[in-house]
Image (spheres, helix red, strand yellow):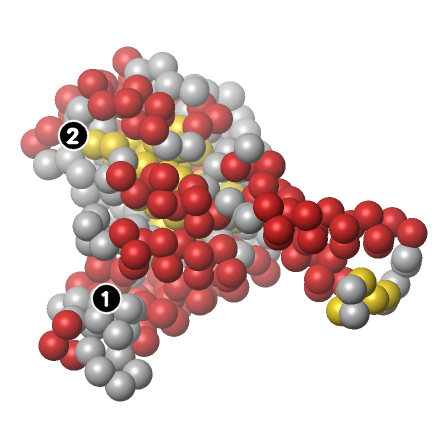
Amino acid sequence: MSPMSAAWVPPGPAMLFCPADRPERYAKAVERADVVIVDLEDAVAPAGRPAARDALRASSLDPARTIVRVNPVETDDHAADLEALAATDYRCVMLAKTESAAQVTDVHSATGAAVLALVETPLGVVRATEIASAPGCAGMMWGAEDLLAGMGGTTSRFADSEAGGPRVAGEYRDVPRHARAAVALAAAAFGRWAVDSVHLDIADEAGQRAEALDAVALGYAATACIHPSQVAIVRAAYAPSDEEVAWARRVLDAAATNPGVFQLDGRMIDGPVFRQAEATLRRHEAAS
């Protein structure tokens, strides 16, 4: 693998996890999603990881659409994962349970790959800003269930029995919501792209859509999926409507001849609105 900067960016919003020990699924995952995350960590039993690394080495997916998730730095599998990654042309690595900037820098230095820092422990969330600032960090992602497990908790979301009043079944509890916001802010502060966490309830299409729409509103660049059926929902949520695209183009066209603050259809247009229009068109281009 040749040395790379942290310039790798996702080509679209729907990222689909695929177990690294199931190479027969690799191509199908790429066909169905914008990015495939070949997973050497949670999706593979420890005994199966050597074979999974062999499958990774033998694969030939598009590097522009492939991320490899490796095991955390402190595990016995980590070094072997990086060795397998180095034998491929893949240019983005997801570091599970990232907890420091030094971990990101070390992985980037060892592989030359851009690092997607997966923040999913209490320490990782507390250090999200530090992690986002690390050389080699291309993007940030967060994980809810590992975070709650690390806190001694039981579940990241409200259950049906807890619904009522301000609580809605299926919505995140306060700590996961904080982690989600912290990662989005840290990523934005240092010019990194951010990936929203998976929605574990595959049958909850309405919840998946609502979460993806909220991710767009918060500036997330992508959402991770655990099942192919979630891909279309995520793509539709990230794709701006025809009306939104038309408005964004009008804003940018008007800005070309109206420097500074101006009005369009009775609405004040300034720097923030201009940047929102640019973001809308970027999402439209990614969806096209």
Return the residue at label 2: 49
Say which residue appears at 84% left-offset and 54% top-offset: 255
Horizontal arrangement in the rendering, residue 20 relative to residue 64 (left or right): left
Which amino acid, by three-letter code, is at mark 2?
Answer: Arg
Say which residue appears at 35% left-offset and 25% top-offset: 30
Rendered location of residue 193, percent (x, y): 52, 48
In the image as oriented, which residue stretches furthest toward the left?
Answer: 47
Return the residue at label 1: 170
Q: Quadrant of the C terminus?
A: top right
Which disc number belongs to residue 101?
none
Residue 71 visible in the current orientation: no
Residue 45 visible in the current orientation: yes
Secondary structure type for disc 2 = helix
Q: Please tell me whether mark 2 or mark 1 is closer to you in this view.
A: 1
From the viewer's perspective, is residue 90 above or below residue 131?
Answer: above
Q: Earlier in the sequence, mark 2 or mark 1?
A: 2
- The quadrant in which residue 93 appears is top left
Rendered location of residue 227, percent (x, y): 24, 39
Secondary structure type for disc 1 = loop
In the image as oriented, which residue stretches furthest toward the bottom?
Answer: 165
Rendered location of residue 164, percent (x, y): 22, 82
From the viewer's perspective, is residue 233 above or below residue 277?
Answer: above
